[in-house]
Image (tube, rainbow, N blue to C red):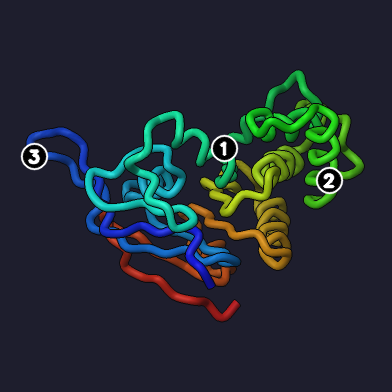
């Protein structure tokens, strides 16, 4: 399998006396078709790691490669293009626009792809059907449950066929039953070919993923394939 995302000797330090080291020589490769849980306690560096993988921040040293191309040296406009076309993001807070329907919210994921409004709407409907919301296309976020809102956010992240979907604590605001449903959805999407990295503090959830990467004190302490 080809690596769709690689981190090579990534460090991240913030100014201070002494500087605050958050990531310390991270090496990590995400292959096409992977479903990976990155787990660690608060302050372990997992959110900073997500920022590196998602080209949301630049490392102090090292290289970030997406589809084999080093991206951390790109200018801001080029980086935005990489994020918009090759990466999909799912966040804990959903980030849906309350005045738009589920279809319209998902369609916003293609605003910068040069896709016509008609095609955006059609692809948004297909993405919502893929996550089990074909019956809720016209509902606004206020009429959806927490689990449904997260499914809308996942559908939006899938639009445009990104190389990888990065999910930051996607079940953090959901109860245990809905969490199980979202985990099953990620597993199903992975079976369909999506490459997914999920950031979580929940060890039990992490163990349900095919691959677990554990980060502690800015270093990867474990990287293993589970028996799930």
Residue 121 in the image: above or below residue 193 = above
Residue for badge 1:
84
What residue is shown at x 59% (from left), y 47% (from top)? Answer: 170
Question: What is the tally of numbered marks visible in this picture?
Answer: 3
**Element on which disc 2 rests:** helix
98 and 147: which is toward the camera: 98
Q: Position of residue 93 (x, y in %)?
A: 58, 34
What residue is shown at x 48% (from left), y 65% (from top)? Answer: 3
Residue 126 image label: 2
The answer to whether residue 104 is visible is yes
Q: Position of residue 120 (x, y in %)?
A: 78, 34
Q: CA distance from mark 1 to mark 2?
A: 19 Å
Q: What crowding class fits label 3: few (fewer than 14 Cα within 10 Å), some (14-19), or many (20 or more)?
A: few
In the image, taking residue 187 as reference, residue 200 lies left or right, namely left
Q: Position of residue 139 (x, y in %)?
A: 85, 30
**Element on which disc 3 rests:** loop
Please identify the quadrant where the C terminus is shown.
bottom right
Q: Residue furthest right?
A: 135
Q: CA distance from mark 3 to mark 2?
A: 51 Å
What residue is shown at x 53% (from left), y 56% (from top)? Answer: 197
Residue for badge 3:
18
Closer mark to the observer between disc 3 and disc 2 = 2
Residue 223 image label: none
Q: CA distance from mark 1 to mark 3?
A: 36 Å
Q: Are marks 1 and 3 in contact (CB under 8 Å)?
A: no
Q: What crowding class fits label 2: few (fewer than 14 Cα within 10 Å), some (14-19), or many (20 or more)?
A: some
């Amino acid at each position: 399998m080809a690596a769709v995302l690689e981190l090579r000797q990534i460090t991240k330090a913030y100014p201070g006396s002494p500087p605050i080291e958050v990531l310390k020589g991270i090496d990590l490769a995400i292959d096409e078709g992977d479903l990976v849980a990155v787990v660690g306690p608060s302050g372990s560096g997992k959110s900073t790691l997500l920022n590196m993988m998602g080209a949301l921040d630049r490392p102090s040293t090292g290289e970030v490669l997406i589809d084999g191309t080093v991206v951390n040296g790109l200018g801001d406009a080029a980086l935005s293009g990489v994020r918009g076309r090759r990466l999909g993001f799912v966040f804990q807070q959903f980030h849906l626009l309350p005045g738009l329907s589920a279809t319209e919210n998902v369609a916003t994921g293609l605003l910068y792809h040069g896709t016509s409004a008609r095609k955006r709407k059609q692809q948004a409907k297909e993405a919502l059907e893929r996550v089990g919301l074909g019956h809720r296309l016209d509902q606004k976020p206020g009429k959806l449950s927490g689990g449904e809102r997260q499914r809308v956010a996942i559908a939006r992240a899938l639009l445009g066929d990104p190389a990888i979907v990065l999910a930051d604590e996607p079940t953090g605001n959901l109860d245990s039953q809905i969490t199980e449903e979202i985990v099953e959805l990620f597993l199903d999407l992975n079976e369909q070919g999506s490459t997914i990295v999920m950031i979580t503090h929940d060890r039990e959830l992490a163990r349900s993923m095919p691959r677990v990467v554990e980060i502690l004190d800015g270093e990867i302490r474990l990287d293993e394939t589970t028996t799930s």
